[in-house]
Image (cartoon, grey):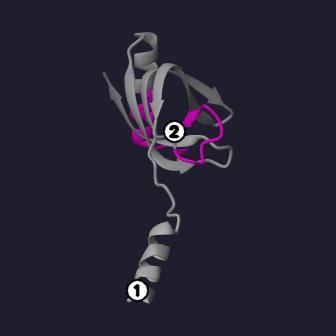
Amino acid sequence: MKIKNLILAAMLLIPFPSYAVGTYIGKLQPYFYTDALYLIPVESQISNKPDCVKRNYLRLPNTPDSPFFDAKFSILLSAWVAKQELLVTGTGECTGEGDEIIRSIKPL
């Protein structure tokens, strides 16, 4: 019985990786650098950033030939020009530079 309790306690104390998905609400400035589109949170509330985030940028997946990229870029640019807030969620994954990759964009 003691061994079972010891094994159970050990299993509960083993650290599990966190799979946080960042949530960003507010104004986000689009910023192109070389071939990538970044977002800079401006007047934004940020929550649940994953551990891999090292910089304060978000990044659109690097697929500029995709119609999804065009649609997301249009939403971002329109919202920035109109000074409209967005709800952006990440994938929980980061680039090598430590920027969270964007999963979804929703105008508020």
> How many numbered circles does the render carry?
2
Crowd band around label 1 with a 10 angstrom C-alpha radius: few (<14), some (14–19), many (20+): few
* Helix, strand or loop status at disc 1: helix
Image location (x, y in percent) of residue 50: 52, 46
Dot 1 amino acid type? Lys
- Residues in magenta, as a range: 50-74
Q: Residue furthest left?
A: 108
Dot 2 amino acid type? Leu
* Helix, strand or loop status at disc 2: loop
Q: Choose mark 2 or mark 1, whichever is in front.
A: 1
Vertical position of residue 17 compared to residue 60: above or below:
below
Vertical position of residue 49 compared to residue 75: above or below:
below
Is 62 or 50 nearer to us in this picture? 50
Q: Is 103 positioned to the left or the right of 101 in the image? A: left
Question: What is the distance, in whole Å, between disc 2 and disc 1 at their CAs?
Answer: 48 Å
**Rendering quarter of residue 106:** top left
Image location (x, y in percent) of residue 47: 45, 34
Q: Main secondary structure of the magenta part?
A: loop
Q: Does 73 appear in magenta?
A: yes
Is 57 or 53 nearer to us in this picture? 53
Cβ atoms at labels 2 and 1 below 8 Å apart: no
Image location (x, y in percent) of residue 4: 40, 86
Question: Which of the two labelled residues, at mark 2 and mark 1, occupies the earlier sequence position?
Answer: 1
Residue found at x 62% / y 28%: 32
Which residue position is annotated with label 1? 4
Q: Quadrant of the N terminus?
A: bottom left
Residue found at x 65% / y 35%: 55
Residue found at x 45% / y 38%: 69
**Rendering quarter of residue 62:** top right
Label at residue 52: none
Which residue position is annotated with label 2? 60
